[in-house]
Amino acid sequence: MENLEHELKVKIIETLDLSDLKPEDIDNEARLVGGDFGIDSIDVLELVIMVEQGYGVTIDSKEVGEKVFASVNALAEHIRANRAS
Amino acid sequence: MKVRIFVVGMGAVTPAGAGVPALLEALLSGGRHIRPLSLFPANSKGALPVGELPADVWADVVQRVEDGGIPRTHALALAAALEAVAGGPPPDAVVLGGTTGGMGLTEVLLKEGVSDLERYRLHGTGTVAEYVAFRLGCTGPALTVSTACSSGAVAVKLGMELIRSGRAHRVLVGGADCLCRLTYYGFSMLQLIDPDGTRPLDRNRNGMSVAEGAGMLLLEGAPCGEPVPDTALAEVLGAGLSCDAYHPSAPHPEGAGALSAMKRALAEAGVAPGDVSYVNLHGTGTRDNDAAEAKALVSLFGPGLPPVSSTKGGVGHSLAAAGAVEAVISVLALRHGVVPGNVGLTEPDPAFGLVPAGASFPAELSAVLSNSFGFGGNNAAVLFGPTERNGEDWERRTAGADARAAGAGASGQPSFEMGRLRVLAVACISGAGHTTETLSALAEGRSAAGVLPEETVTRDLPPRALRRMKRLPRLTLALADAVLKAAAHPVDGIYLGTGWGPLSETWEFLDKLFGSNLEFSSPTDFVGSVHNAVAGQVAIWHKATGPNITATGGDTSFEQALLAAQLTLTNGDTVACVLGADEAHEKLSPLLDESVATGLAEGTVLSDGGAGLVVALGQGGPGIGLRLLAPVADGDSDVERLVNAAGGAERVREFFGAILAGIPAARRTQGKSLLDRFLARTQFEGAVVDYRLQTGELASASAIASAWAVREVSAPGSSLAKGRGILLLGLGETLSVVEVLP
C-alpha cells in the first residue's frame, strides 16, 4: 500500500520540477497545495494531467481538486477509490 | 496641441457573422453563437462548445479578403480592417493585438513534419498587422501587441497615443485571433472551457467559450476646438493600462489590477465613475475572473453601479480580438442606445453584489467603459463617449497629452516631437556572456554569437523560482534582474519586444499534445507559451504594476517595445524597463526565422539573448529614441526615408560618431545595398558596424546593439561614439532608425 504513495511523491517532484526535494522530504500528511512546497493552482492542473495520464483517474480541479490534493495520502486514496482495476 | 480621438470606422468578424451589422443584430436579439467545435478534431472529452465561425460566415470572410493563401487569423483581420477603412485612404499606422498569428496553420505543419520554410512565413504574430498594413497600402508602422486577452484593448491605447504624440493622424487599431489547437487544448488542459457553453457572471459558471474573430476601429485625431469629423461614430475619451504583478494566469483575487486600469482610464478622460452609464465587462465566465472583476466594479462604483454585462455569452471569448470586438460593441451600444444583455446568464452569482443586464434594453448612454484583462495580469480599460458630447471638459481630458509634450525633445520638427527616453542602466546577454563579457566582445570586434549555458544565464537567480520556466523567461528575468539592480530604482512599466516568443514552451505543449493523440499536454507550458507570460513574470518579480506591453514584430520587436514605452510613459516620476529577448530553439528557430535558417546555412551558430534598458522621461543623457519604423519599399524612397528620419545628411555627420547597422541574414544583399546608399547619401565618415556579424542571427539583436550604443555614448573615451551619438539602423523587412545621444 505504501508503494503508491512513494510513487506519487516521485511523480510530483518530477512533474513539478521540484528538483531540490527528495521523496522522503514530503510527509504523507503534509499540506500539498499552498503549503511549504510552493504548489499553486497551475501545479494542481499539472498534477491533474499526471494522474489522468498515469492512473486513468479524471479529476475536476474546481469541484474536488482541493480535497484530492490536500496531501499525498488524500491523493493516493482518491486514486485507489476511482481507478479501474 | 491637444487632440481629441474619434472612432471614424469599424469592422468586425464574429461567430454572429462577418460585418458590424451582424454583430449589432446579435446584440439586439441576444443571440447565442456558441456551438461544439468542428474546425479541427476534438479528443475523447468530446467537442466542447466554442465560438467558431459557421461555414457560411467563413465563406463570406474569404470572399471579402480575396486571398485564399493566407492563414485564418490573417483573413479575419483583413476582412474586419477592410470594413473599418471602407475604401478610404490608408491609415498612417496599424496597431493590432494578436496571440496566435499564423499558429492555426503552423501547428498543422509541425504535426505533419513539414520542413518547407516558405510555409512558415506567415507564422509570426506580427505578420497579421504587417499583412493588413500591406493590403491597405499603409506605409507607416505596423505594430503588434501581444498581451493575451487584453491585446485588442491595449492596441486602442497605443493607437490613441500615436495620434496624440503627432506621429499619426489616422490609425487602424484592433485585434484578431482564430481558433487553433494550441489555445483550445490549452484552455481545455486548464479546465477553463465550460462544457455547457460559457455563462458569464452566473452562479454556476464553469469557464469560457474560446472563440475566434476580429475587431477593428479606425481612429482619427481632431485638434481640440476644431469641428468633430463628419464620419465620427464615437469619441475615445481615455484608456488605462495596469498589471496585476500577482500570478501568471490567475487574476488578483481582489481585482486590484482591474480596478487600477479602470481608474486610470477614467482619470485620463476626466470622467467621474458616476458619469459612466454602461460597463462592457471582460466577463469571461471563469470562476476567478468574474469574481475578481465584480470586486473591482463594486469597489470603483459602489452603490452607483451603472448597468454592466458581458457579451462573451453571445460571441465567445476571441482572446486577442476580444478587447477590439468589445470596443466595437461599446460604440454600437452608445450609438444605438442599447445596453447589451448578458447572454448565457440564468442565475446571477449572489456573492457579487451586482446584477448584470439580463436581456438587452434601450438606454441613453453617455460614457461606456470596456474592460479587457489577460494572462500575465495584463489589464486594459477603454472609455468611449458620444460624438455630440459637450466639449467643455476636454481641457481636463487631454491633460495626459500635455504631459507628453512637456517631456518631448526641444526641436520643433514633427518627427522629433516624441523626444527621447533617458537611459538609467543597461544589461545584456549574448553567447559571449552577461553584460561585461558581451560589451567587451562587441567593442573588441569579437563574436558574441552562440547560446549561453543555462546555468550561466541564471547564475544570479533563485533556482526554486525558475522551476516552471524555460529558456525565454529565464533569459528575460536574468536581464531584468541585472538591469534593475544596476538602476537601483523601483520600476512601474515593463515593455518587452520578442520576435518569436517562448518557443520552448510552445514546442513542448504541441509535442506532448500531438504525442498523446490530443489527450494530454502541460497546462504550465500553455500558460508559459503566451507571448506576454514573460513580461508578466518580470512584473511579478519586480512588483511592476504599471503598463505591461509585449510587442512582437520579427526583427523590429525591440523597436516596437521602445515605441510603446515612448508612447505610454507619461509620468516623469516613474521608470520603465524596456527589454528585447529571443531564445534559440533548435527546431523552431530555423523553421520560423528566415534569417536564422540563412545564417545556419552559411555556417553561423544558433544564437540567443537580448538586452534590457531602464528608462525614464526627461532630458539628460544618454537618451534613446525611435525615429522611424516602416515597411521597406525596396526602392530609392527607402534611403530618403532613413536620411529624413535621421534628421538629414548634415545632422547625421554632425551628431553621430558611429552607425550600428542591423542587417538580417535573409535580407543581406538588399540591406547591405541600402546601407551603402545611405552612407553615400550622407557622406558619413565615422565607424560603421554590421553588428549581426557579431551577435549572430536573433530577432532581438537590435536590443543588444542598443545597449552597446548606450554604453559607448556614455563612456567618455569611447573610440566609437567619439563624444557624439550613435545611430542604429534596422535594414530588414522593416526599416527602423533609433538614435542614442549623449
Image (cartoon, grey):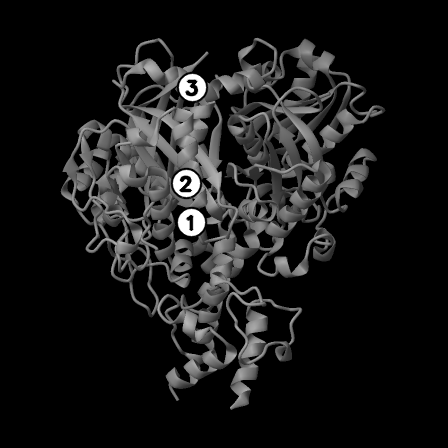
Please provide percent x and percent y for residue B193: 33, 59
Discs 3 and 1 share one subunit? yes
Callout 3, which amino acid?
Thr
Residue B244 visible to the viewer: yes
Residue that mark 2 sits on:
B259
Residue B395 vs B466, above or below: the answer is: above
The residue closer to the viewer here, B139 or B269, is: B269
Discs 1 and 2 share one subunit? yes
Chain to which the residue tagged by mark 2 belongs? B
Residue B186 vs B89, above or below: the answer is: below
Callout 2, which amino acid?
Leu
Q: Secondary structure at mark 2?
A: helix
Discs 3 and 2 share one subunit? yes
Q: Quadrant of the C terminus of chain B?
A: top right
Residue B167 visible to the viewer: no
Please provide percent x and percent y for residue B49: 27, 58
Q: What residue do we see at 42% from left, 47% from top? A: B255
Residue B85 vs B202, above or below: the answer is: above
Distance from Cα at disc 1 to Cα at disc 2: 9 Å
The residue closer to the viewer here, B310 or B324, is: B310
Callout 1, which amino acid?
Glu
Residue that mark 1 sits on:
B254
Crowd tier of the residue under label 3, counting other residues whose Cα lies within 10 Å: few below 14, some 14–19, many 20 or above: many
